[in-house]
Image (cartoon, coloured by chain):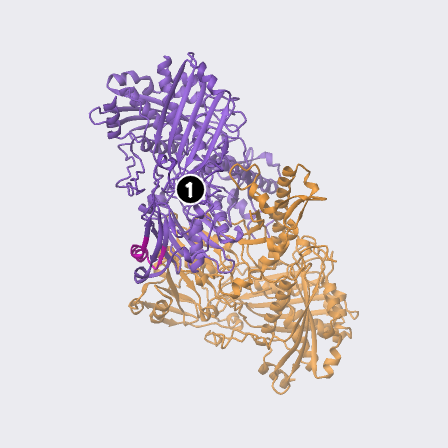
Chain colours: A purple, B orange
Amino acid sequence: MSDFSYVGIPTPMIDGPAKVTGNLKYTGDLKLAGMLHARFVLSTYAHANISGIDSAAALAVPGVQRVLTADDLPEVVPSSRAMLMLARDRVIFVGQPIAMVLADSPAAAADGAELVEVDYEPLATVTSMDAALAEDAPVIWPNGIPTGAEDEAAHGADTGGESEEDEGEPSNIAGKSHMAKGDVAAAFAEADVIVERTFETPMVHQSSIETQGWVVQPNPLNGGVTMWGSLQSPFGARLDVANILGVPESDVNVYGMPVGGGFGAKFGLYEPLIALVSVTVGRPVSLILTRGEELLTTNPAPALRVQAKLGFRSDGSLLAMQSNVLADTGVYPSGLGGFAAMQFASFYRCDNLLLESTNVITNKQSVGAYRAPTSPTAFMAVETLFDEAAAALGIDPVELRLKNAARAGDPAPGGGDFPVIGMVETLEAAREHPLWRNREESRAQGHGVGIAIGGWMGGLEPGASVCKLNRDGVLQVQIGTADLSGTPTSFALLAAEAYGVEPERVRFVYSDTDSAPYGGGVGGSKTMYTLGAAVIRAAEEARRQTLAIAAEEFEVSAEDLEIVDGRVQVRGFPDRSISLGELAGKAMTFDGKYEPVHGNGRQAITDRAPSFCAQIAEVEVDEETGDVNLLNLAVVQDVGRAINPLAVEGQMQGGAVQGVGWALLEEMRYDEDGQLLTGSWMDYAMPDAVQAAPIDTQIVEVPSVSGPYGARGVGEPPVIPTVAAIANAVAHATGLRMTQTPMTAPRVLEALQAR
Amino acid sequence: MSDFSYVGIPTPMIDGPAKVTGNLKYTGDLKLAGMLHARFVLSTYAHANISGIDSAAALAVPGVQRVLTADDLPEVVPSSRAMLMLARDRVIFVGQPIAMVLADSPAAAADGAELVEVDYEPLATVTSMDAALAEDAPVIWPNGIPTGAEDEAAHGADTGGESEEDEGEPSNIAGKSHMAKGDVAAAFAEADVIVERTFETPMVHQSSIETQGWVVQPNPLNGGVTMWGSLQSPFGARLDVANILGVPESDVNVYGMPVGGGFGAKFGLYEPLIALVSVTVGRPVSLILTRGEELLTTNPAPALRVQAKLGFRSDGSLLAMQSNVLADTGVYPSGLGGFAAMQFASFYRCDNLLLESTNVITNKQSVGAYRAPTSPTAFMAVETLFDEAAAALGIDPVELRLKNAARAGDPAPGGGDFPVIGMVETLEAAREHPLWRNREESRAQGHGVGIAIGGWMGGLEPGASVCKLNRDGVLQVQIGTADLSGTPTSFALLAAEAYGVEPERVRFVYSDTDSAPYGGGVGGSKTMYTLGAAVIRAAEEARRQTLAIAAEEFEVSAEDLEIVDGRVQVRGFPDRSISLGELAGKAMTFDGKYEPVHGNGRQAITDRAPSFCAQIAEVEVDEETGDVNLLNLAVVQDVGRAINPLAVEGQMQGGAVQGVGWALLEEMRYDEDGQLLTGSWMDYAMPDAVQAAPIDTQIVEVPSVSGPYGARGVGEPPVIPTVAAIANAVAHATGLRMTQTPMTAPRVLEALQAR
């Protein structure tokens, strides 16, 4: 039997009915009095000077009120992608905002945007890393690459290593990183088996169902604004907007609206621009991106090229790991290349490491965080090479991983030692999965079965929560962040468990930044892990306060009280009881003599709880067409403690489906002029329900030390190993090592033919 | 020098600019998508059966969407005035809502309401207390008077005494109260001087600048609603609305909007009806009362008739006090008569009391709380009689009051003893006021000078507050109630004082009931007294949390730290310091190692801090016309501690101006058919700036034990003694004892002529 009353019970999303009936209001549903609808005019050139902008035709459209260009806005140093306002004189990627049309209706704004005429003088364009690194390459930032890049890597874990900035001539190199440990050259010299390959993955887009959107209401008195948005970090948006407006953050209030998918893309992009526009025109402004804009001008995952090399002794012990990552970060710098190099080498025991990266600027849209940033690529590299090494060594692939897997006490990336982790337990559970056990039968049928594991350190951020008791006996719990993945349901289970009431008596409130306790951003698989602890503490304090009131009412000690079926009762005397609602009411009335129940929970957990996901893929490869048909996918994940198994399985399935997209389908393709060829969902292929194959989820629970009831972060691990598992399955079926994604039929066919 | 850094500094209202520039949004400014505008159809008869309602013409008005009558709503037991929905079959007062027109615009709703035809069958009408109490009077509630009346008395203090319900035949008597102490008959027999008179005051209307208004958005999923309203008690509205809708209060969220005047009238009236209407039609609905509706169909103060009698020994000691109050409560019962009887005898030492009341039902609109409910009348009685007795005894009127004034340790009304109170100090300060010292010179000029004092026990209610520190170094303090009187500014001074920063660094947030800590209702002069303590505690906890972070940063003990100019610094080492904003940021970021600063303050103060206001009026009475010209008014009040002297003086002036209205101008007049004759501000006379006379305020500070830094309730006392002070001034000038208000020229002239 479980030690818990509510934690661990599969519980449907409490806000599911509101979502499926359309009653939940999203940012795009908001209408403010006097609100203007905004539409971008986006650059159609990847690199060009702007010689003129003619807004006359646009302004003639009925309903169009303003056409703003850079001249209408203050000059802002573009110290980060979010601080890049409307283009001034020059554009550097297709999709860069040049002008903004403001109109009384979305249709008028769109019509107006079509009619703004921009005169371009095309410039030489750099759209690939190789071209960008060529000696005579045009330099995209001749006056120096902006500093202060968004640290998307913090999304997950420390990037580690040291960064080297080129101090010399202007170039398209935005930064390099270098991390060394031990003596890699000597270790490779000593190795019995060396495996090495170069892997490439393209830009891939988060493609949430809900596009990005914001509504802003200016406050003419203090120069601040109120903002509503589909945001992963309302408090982060508050700070960004305050900075651009030059007001204290307390003059900005942000409502984090329900989010229809984030995946890292909604950590901040056009908040400063739209706030500045709204203040400039002195009217409420709504900007809801179209699907095309979403694909053209947001922050997808970077393209990566990973040169990777592993060296083993004949007994299977890992001697050396080396990675050199080239990251195509589009027009803005990013530290993601270094993070990829680090992720490659984070979870196997190895004393000799050489991890290097170069971040390269190209005339393409900037990049950002996407669920476990860079990890599908980094683990494609390490897990493909482990598979090859196992074959070369004659060791079972799972055994080879187990032999080298990190365990508690091993050095962890970024310093310190690993706490209790479940890498071994996850691999052991995967080893027992029928899909793996039957892999030779499967191959006998012409299929292939591959396995891979992925690891994630997990993010951390302080946060707080508040827990009130209402006169209806409902526990109202307040947090100040967004919901990406059904967390209110899991939080409700935590609060119910900690306070001692049924989850049906718990309500969750997501408040605006003025009213909410600090909640931090939602990302890095940290929401349940960190804020969950705050919720538990708030509920526990509310319980203590509740029992203190009842103790005074019944003239007993609080220790002699229990909460049963929504009533506080004296242990052993069920007739001496009071309902929670009545008790709350005694503190919520004129002449009440008790302080209202109002528990406060704060946390600043500093221990990480790394989590692991292993996946087993079974594929069929059509050798005539190159088509890879995913037949089965098993997802085995250590979640520490499954607070709500339904939500956990949902995350495991969702992550794996996105992994399938990475592996088989998704690619932001650009032509040599930097034009995006996959600018709609007709062209940019994401997995549908059939392509995603049957997914079997298996939860492993190795409790963490600091997480709520042992929980670990869940969101990111399941996207990590899918590419590698499918690639290893393709190799199992065909002998072919695919090193480039997506593994589309033409690409596989070409490889088969080259074999 | 003051012991305080910020408390006591006269500080302009921090939200003044937003108010005077029109940037603050009131309920009437709100527009929701799809919102319908509501307009009442009000009864034009005081008592009638409804034989038919024809909505056809109204429905033909373009934009009119619905005309609702009682048939469209569930039957609800009218257990309180707020639970009286649309009239079913019978109306019992002029202004009773019969139907509600819902339209796309306010104009269409008004046009529609004009066209709804109601067929009435008039019934015998009872519009005066005498008629209501006559043997053969028509009984307004033949099936029994509703119980569960709103306990407006709780607004101020305990009603005390015992209530006797007539259990016999149906009548128009809604309830009686009786409280006796000692032996009144024997005491009067022993008295050397007995003074007695009967006093009468009419219904008087609160008449806020902003009329009452609500906007409701139904939630089709849970049957609850979101409500925005001009409310004195958002949490009270939440409960009322939940009750009518039959949902848990947690399914209702209430935004307390900025309030343009409350004075007791906005403690709950049409919230349940408008919520029910909104849910019935499934659309957002806005109801903003017109000025005429405000006067016809809200809850003004009751009309009172007080038979009062005092007995003194020749040395001036008070032997006996007797009052018998008749209260005209309109169509709904109210406990206000008993409260008036109690207030009459609460603040002078007296061992023999007989206090009785009868609450009478009439065919007029129901009554409610109005700033220090019933006290202008009760103190008109006691303070007039003290004045007369002083003359009869040959004792100075102030000395007679001082001799009998309550002091700490004397028995207090409602049980227990008085804590430290400033009745004596207030009288002593008034005695020294030039207006009083020069009263005989004034009379020599043909003027009259009168003095009176009023006392108020003060309300109590638990409440909580939250205090956060933002990354801009701003302290954001959150409470869950409304602002009637500039309390945010005073709260900011408290938080600044307790935390140790300049008030400019403090921001106040009034949140919705979902997001706010419980705040209770704003009334009873308790907001600063009770919630102020919660604000201080929250700020103190935030300070402790702040210093704990800094202590860890600087590796010193928290005791060695101080907050100076927005920085935490090590005492004696000003270069070892960190700004509050930077410090907050360390707890509001990825990988932060400190818990966010989030202080929690709760209070359930159970000690009252009675407060006193003495007033001195100088008048000139035109013996030819009867016109009473108020020349000067001095307001001397013990406020315990003036947190913000500007706000305190504003309350003293505002209360006194309303007192002038009671004394000289204001009266809800009805004809014998129950038609309101003063149904607009053209007819209902309130004091203008000239009529209010120069008002001199003088603050007395006798610190309370439990209030924030010694503060006492401030709002209600200054309205209490004005009537009596002016009546005593009239007597001083003319020898005439006025016993009825308003003391209009015709009424005074009649008394002069009868003299």
**Percent of width and height locating residue B74:** 37, 56
- Residue A94 falls left or right of residue B315: left
Amino acid marked by disc 1:
Tyr
On what subunit does the disc labeled 1 rest? A
Q: Nearer the viewer, residue A30 or B38?
A: A30
Q: Is residue A111 magenta?
A: yes
Q: Residue at x 56, y 49 (%)?
A: B472
Q: Quadrant of the C terminus of chain B?
A: bottom right
Q: Spot the residue most to the front.
A: A136
- Hey, which quadrant is residue A552 in on the image? top right
Chain part drawn in magenta: A100-119
Q: Which residue is mark 1?
A: A332
Residue A688 on the magenta segment: no
Pick the front one: A569 or A311: A311
Q: Quadrant of the N terminus of chain B?
A: bottom right
Q: Residue at x 42, y 28 (%)?
A: A324
Q: Nearer the viewer, residue A428 or A130?
A: A130
Q: Is residue A575 visible?
A: no
Say whether residue A67 is visible: yes
Give x and y (percent) for residue B317. Answer: 76, 67
Q: Position of residue B54 (x, y in %)?
A: 31, 68
Q: Would you place residue B548 above or below residue B14 in this image?
A: above
**Rendered position, A385 above or below A652:** above
| Residue B211: x %, y % from top left | 48, 66
Q: Residues within 10 Å of mark 1 (few under 14, many from 20)?
A: many
The residue most toward the bottom is B624
